[in-house]
């Protein structure tokens, strides 16, 4: 392949497929070319463009942590042509990948501080990369609180990891589902993520808050944090706008004049306050 | 840079075509003039103000294959469609506004992630612009920092004189074209003749929009300006058809799609437009620019804020095409004037 072609993907082999919900799955992928696998590196929070040849490309974050080497993972919902194609892939099949693109979570700046993670739905995917990174460097960070919710119990992703995290004593996990989404044996909270987060009265002293989820959830989380006087420099989110090129050219993902693909996808609330309301 | 006189544009065309150079220029197409490939010097027409299309399609094709894939149960084979060589091309008769537009596109496609599909075509292309001696009511190049004889973006600029052209090389590439065809060029006449040739059109071009582009940029620097009530009014007529974007010399939005199935596919980079409702639609159904005024606002902001601040080049070159093609009479200069007033543009 001609490496001057910025649109040229690298081949990756699917090594594992994990169903997460009825319409969401996680694919574990490994570069077919050993040399590419060896030289590939990324930072937590970055994203890539995933190809199903014949169907097209879609943008997903890298849902695994760079501390877990030898593979990357993507988590996606089957909603359109490309994701339907990717959902048909089995272990051993090939897909294409180009990336990593974009900036990453400020894990260096976060060192020594508490980290509060607030996620909703499939928005846990980029946060899971960060959580795994923090757990693999656990001694470098303070308290770790995770608040995660979905519409229903069925819609919670990474259920195996949620159980593992629940068993750990070096983090606090709060799970919630929207009213009506609970099952008879549900032991978590019932309620939308922002009010459930409010009840925890997370300490904003020396604390970072990282959130990702549906735009409406992020909006209410931000409103709550503003009310409580959280430093907007210490509130972080990652925007998952629609993209085609991932390279700052195709014109799709911009919020005002900020191109999410190259200036983001990770933004602080302070940075978003400077951008127009184009989310 | 070198100056010269060209007696006969026809002889230059003949020479280029005989040498096997791909020549693009203004050509009649029914009742209009378009930039198109020329097969003979007779295809060239000098009777045009701005061709109906912009010349961007010769560097940034409407549709282009960037990758091919063949696949079966055993694996995937990829074939890169980036060529090492693109055909030597001269685009002759480019209007100065369009040449400036190409210089703006250059910045978008260059940078950290260099789009070699564009850049290699650009490297193989020489832009020979021709100054305007006429304008129409929709032209407003001087309001965006350009002019009917602005050399920006050209390699060679020709200004029509009585009996020939005043020629000025703008880049090394332009000089090389002059040197390579020395027999076709004479010594340059007085530069004053060239300036006099464009004096008339300069006085005809709209002057009421002076400094509005800069004022609009300042207006947009306040994030709250995006929520200004004027946008709804300014864009209420817009049909979301995207015509303005396709004729625009600086609009560069594109899509990347796969075509073909059953064992083989082509990946294509196709023109797209920020005016379409599905353009920014998320998989979840959320759409950041769900309504047309928001999309029209985005295009305007791209022209007057994103381009000048992100790529440090003009996003609007005042060619007037978006005004000419709009089926509902949407006029970007009305918005320029309105928002410049909102920004407190000094009157007078």
Image (tube, coloured by chain):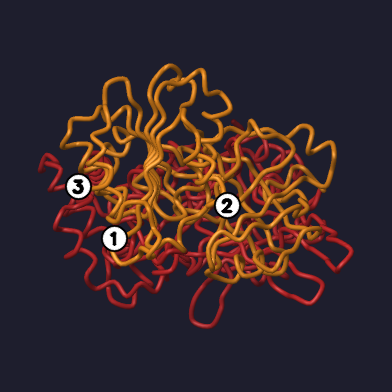
Chain colours: A orange, B red
Q: Write down the residue under mark 2.
A: A245
Q: Secondary structure at mark 2?
A: loop
Dots 1 and 3 on the same chain: yes
A220 over B137 or under it: above or below: above
The local crowd at label 2, few if under 14, some if 14 to 19, many if 20 or more residues have their Cα within 10 Å, is many
Helix, strand or loop at label 3? It is helix
Q: CA distance from mark 1 to mark 2?
A: 22 Å
Gap between marks 2 and 3 measured at Cα: 28 Å
Residue named by callout 3: B225
Badge 2: chain ID = A
Judged left or right of residue B266, residue B98 is left
- Between B200 and B236, the one lying in front of the other is B236
Pick out the residue farthest to the front: A185
Residue lying furthest right? B74
Name the residue at 60% across, 47% down: A48
Q: In the drawing, does residue B178 fall left or right of residue A37? A: left
Q: Nearer the viewer, residue B250 or B240?
A: B240
Quarter of image, res B113: top right
The chain that hosts pointer 1 is: B
Residue in the image at 72% along x and 70% along y: B39
* Residue at the disc numbered 1: B294
Q: How many marks?
A: 3
Viewer-nearest of labels 2 and 3?
A: 2
Taking the image as drawn, is residue B268 in sight?
A: yes
How far apart marks 1 and 3 lie (CA) works out to: 12 Å
For label 1, count other residues whose C-alpha is less than 10 Å away and answer few (under 14), some (14-19) or many (20+). some
């Amino acid at each position: 392949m001609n490496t001057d072609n910025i649109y040229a993907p690298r081949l990756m082999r699917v090594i594992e497929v994990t169903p997460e919900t009825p319409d969401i799955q996680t694919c574990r992928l490994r570069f077919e070319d050993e040399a590419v696998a060896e030289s590939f590196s990324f930072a937590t929070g970055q994203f890539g463009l995933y190809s199903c040849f014949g169907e097209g490309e879609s943008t997903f974050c890298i849902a695994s942590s760079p501390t877990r080497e030898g593979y990357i993972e993507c988590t996606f919902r089957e909603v359109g042509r490309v994701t339907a194609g990717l959902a048909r892939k089995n272990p051993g099949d090939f897909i294409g990948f180009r990336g990593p693109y974009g900036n990453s979570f400020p894990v260096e700046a976060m060192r020594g501080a508490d980290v509060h993670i607030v996620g909703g739905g499939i928005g846990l995917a980029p946060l899971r990369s960060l959580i795994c990174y923090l757990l693999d460097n656990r001694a470098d960070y303070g308290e770790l609180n995770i608040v995660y919710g979905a519409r229903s119990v069925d819609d919670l992703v990474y259920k195996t990891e949620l159980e593992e995290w629940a068993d750990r004593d070096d983090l606090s996990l709060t799970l919630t589902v929207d009213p009506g989404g609970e099952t008879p044996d549900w032991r978590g909270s019932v309620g939308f993520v922002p009010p459930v987060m409010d009840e925890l009265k997370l300490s904003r002293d020396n604390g970072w808050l990282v959130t990702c989820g549906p735009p409406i959830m992020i909006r209410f989380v931000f409103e709550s944090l503003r009310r409580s006087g959280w430093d907007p420099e210490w509130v972080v989110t990652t925007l998952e706008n629609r993209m085609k090129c991932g390279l700052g050219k195709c014109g799709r993902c911009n919020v005002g004049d900020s191109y999410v693909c190259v200036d983001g996808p990770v933004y602080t609330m302070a940075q978003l306050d400077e951008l127009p309301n184009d989310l | 840079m070198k100056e010269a006189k060209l007696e006969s544009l026809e002889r230059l065309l003949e020479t280029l075509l005989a040498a096997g150079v791909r020549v693009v220029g203004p050509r009649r197409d029914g009742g209009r003039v378009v930039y198109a490939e020329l097969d003979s010097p007779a295809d060239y027409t000098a009777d045009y103000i701005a061709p109906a299309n912009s010349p961007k399609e010769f560097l940034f094709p409407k549709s282009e294959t960037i990758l091919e894939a063949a696949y079966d149960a055993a694996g995937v084979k990829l074939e890169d469609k980036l060529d090492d060589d693109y055909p030597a091309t001269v685009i002759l008769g480019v209007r100065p506004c369009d040449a400036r537009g190409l210089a703006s596109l250059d910045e978008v496609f260059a940078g950290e992630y260099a789009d070699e599909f564009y850049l290699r075509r650009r490297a193989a292309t020489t832009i020979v612009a021709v100054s305007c001696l006429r304008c129409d009511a929709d032209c407003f190049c001087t309001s965006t920092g350009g002019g009917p004889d602005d050399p920006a973006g050209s390699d060679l600029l020709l200004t029509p004189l009585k009996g020939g052209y005043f020629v000025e090389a703008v880049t090394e590439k332009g000089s090389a074209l002059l040197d390579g065809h020395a027999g076709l060029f004479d010594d340059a006449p007085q530069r004053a003749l060239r300036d006099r040739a464009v004096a008339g059109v300069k006085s005809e071009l709209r002057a009421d929009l002076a400094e509005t582009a800069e004022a609009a940029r300042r207006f947009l620097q306040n994030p709250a300006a995006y929520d200004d009530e004027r946008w709804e009014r300014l864009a209420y007529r817009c049909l979301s058809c995207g015509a303005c974007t396709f004729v625009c010399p600086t609009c560069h939005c594109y899509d990347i799609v796969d075509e073909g199935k059953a064992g083989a596919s082509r990946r294509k980079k196709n023109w797209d437009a920020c005016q379409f409702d599905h353009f920014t639609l998320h998989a979840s159904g959320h759409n950041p620019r769900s309504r047309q005024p928001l999309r029209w606002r985005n295009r305007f902001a791209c022209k007057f804020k994103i381009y000048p601040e992100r790529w440090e080049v003009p996003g609007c070159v005042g060619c007037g095409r978006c005004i000419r093609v709009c089926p509902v009479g949407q006029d970007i200069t009305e918005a320029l004037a309105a928002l410049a007033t909102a920004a407190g543009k000094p009157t007078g």
